[in-house]
Amino acid sequence: MNLEYPDPELRSDKVHLRKWSFGDLGCVEAASADPEIPRGTTVPALYSEKEGRAWIERSWSRQTSGHGLSMAIADPQTDEARGLVYLGLRRIEGHCELGYWLVPDARGHGLGTAAIRLVSRWVLLDTEVYRLVAYAEPHNSASRALLRKCGFTEEGLLRSYLRFDDGVFDALSFSLLTADLV
């Protein structure tokens, strides 16, 4: 299974989910400045234009290599990138992992909720994916609340599941199934 970018692109009154472009370097720079985003993602911790461009190219390569999709969460009026939503294909056919982040000044405005709802419905109803999983660190109450608000079910604690440069950490596992949407 391979995921193609949605056509037409996913849009709502709050967000536009689209392929990353080099015009989004400002968003990558803002993400690099937040200590939590580079810690758990491939966003460069030390931003330079060269590193930002390399990150965008890696985002594109996820689709072409068959690993999944990386899309910008953009403002629907200005098209300014404000965050990321990632769909990573798993080894088990029909399973997909959801990842997301927003730059700090975009948080708390409902963009994450709108983006996750939009991409979840699309991937579960319009592709062969039937199980979407997401992980949140136990102390990340905002991420846990977002997933619950979007209909995800908390399944349990995965001990020492996440490996970052600064150590190994527990994660809470969440899932959303096609059956949850119908």
Image (cartoon, grey):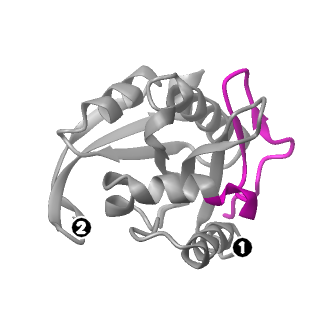
44 left or right, relative to 79: left
| Callouts 1 and 2 close, C-beta under 8 Å | no
- The question of residue 24 being in magenta is answered with yes
Residue 77 percent across, percent down from the top left? 78, 29
When asked about the image quadrant of residue 33, the answer is bottom left
Q: Earlier in the sequence, mark 1 or mark 2?
A: 1
- The question of residue 9 being in magenta is answered with yes
Residue beneath disc 2: 163
13 left or right, relative to 160: right
- The answer to whether residue 122 is seen in the rendering is yes
On residue 79, which mark appears? none
The residue lying at 62 percent from left, 69 percent from top is 62
Image quarter (top left, top right, bottom left or bottom right) of the N terminus: bottom right
On residue 64, which mark appears? 1
The residue lying at 50 percent from left, 52 percent from top is 30
Query: Which amino acid is tagged 2?
Result: Arg
Tell me: residue 108, above or below residue 30.
above
Residue range highlighted in magenta = 1-25
Given residues 76 and 168, the one toward you in this image is 76
Given residues 105 and 64, the one toward you in this image is 105
Looking at the rendered structure, the secondary structure element under dot 1 is helix
Residue 86 percent across, percent down from the top left? 55, 53
| Mark 2 Cα shell of 10 Å, populated few (<14), some (14-19), many (≥20) | few
Given residues 52 and 120, the one toward you in this image is 52
Looking at the rendered structure, the secondary structure element under dot 2 is strand
